[in-house]
Amino acid sequence: MKSTFLAWILRMPLIKRWALMHCVKKENIAEHSHQVAVIAHMLAVIRNTFFQGQLNPEKAATLALYHECSETKLQDINHVTKYHNPELTKEFKKLEKLAEIDCVRSLPEPLQATFENLIIQSQVDPEYKDLVKAADLISAYFKAMDEIRFGNNEFDNVKERLGEMLEHYRATMPEVNYFLDTFSEHCFVSVDKLSAG
């Protein structure tokens, strides 16, 4: 069987995030997925190191790399649009699952079982899924902060919404608190300040 799986993955840099918003810095789902993978890996290491966790950081990073696979077929859907109406949300979730299944089925059959638990979100281990969701929110929050830093007030409401969502993870996942307290401040300074300190 000749597979189209990798061809779809290689199109991730073509899928624009925040498509309905003015952006100072463009972002695609490949860049976003890489950032989420780094954050998820760090969150797992922090949990294991400081909070008696027993997660596999490499698994967390791999799940994060694949967490937006459905968007290779569906594009990035605005969060408010997706979650504004419960009926729409249900239909979007159905479409996402169909796209995830389609991605897995594009692989040679002997490989499909391995990738099902990475790509089909309903089959991802819930503990890892929560960690990747936290990393996803942190990445989006950093994006909003970055846009605001460069004068783009279109992200003011995004920052507020994501900040409220992150409070849940701060309250339930101590590694998120540790991560934000330790790393976030320097993500919004100039390269000169980074180099000096």
Image (cartoon, grey):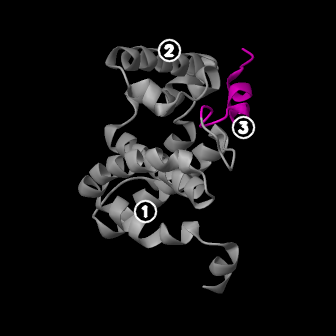
Check disc 2 and give the amino acid type: Leu
Tell whether position 143 is magenta: no
Residue at mark 1: 45
In this picture, residue 176 sits left or right of residue 81: left
**Which residue is pictured at 49% across the width and 34% down the height?**
118
Q: Which residues are magenta?
A: 1-20
Asked if one can make out residue 146 in the rendered structure from this viewpoint, the answer is: yes
Question: Which residue is depicted at the point 63% across and 59% down?
Answer: 150
Q: Earlier in the sequence, mark 1 or mark 2?
A: 1
Q: Earlier in the sequence, mark 3 or mark 2?
A: 3
Q: Nearer the viewer, residue 27 or 121?
A: 27
Q: Say what amino acid the circle numbered 1 marks.
A: Val
Q: CA distance from mark 1 to mark 3?
A: 28 Å
Identify the residue shown where x is 43% and y is 62%. Answer: 45
**Residue 6 x, y percent position in the rendering:** 71, 29
Q: Which mark is residue 98?
A: 2
- Identify the mark at residue 90; answer none if there is no mark: none
* Residue 68 position by quadrant: top right
Instruction: Between residue 84 and residue 197, name the one nearer to us.
Output: 84
Q: Residue at x 33, y 56 (%)?
A: 54
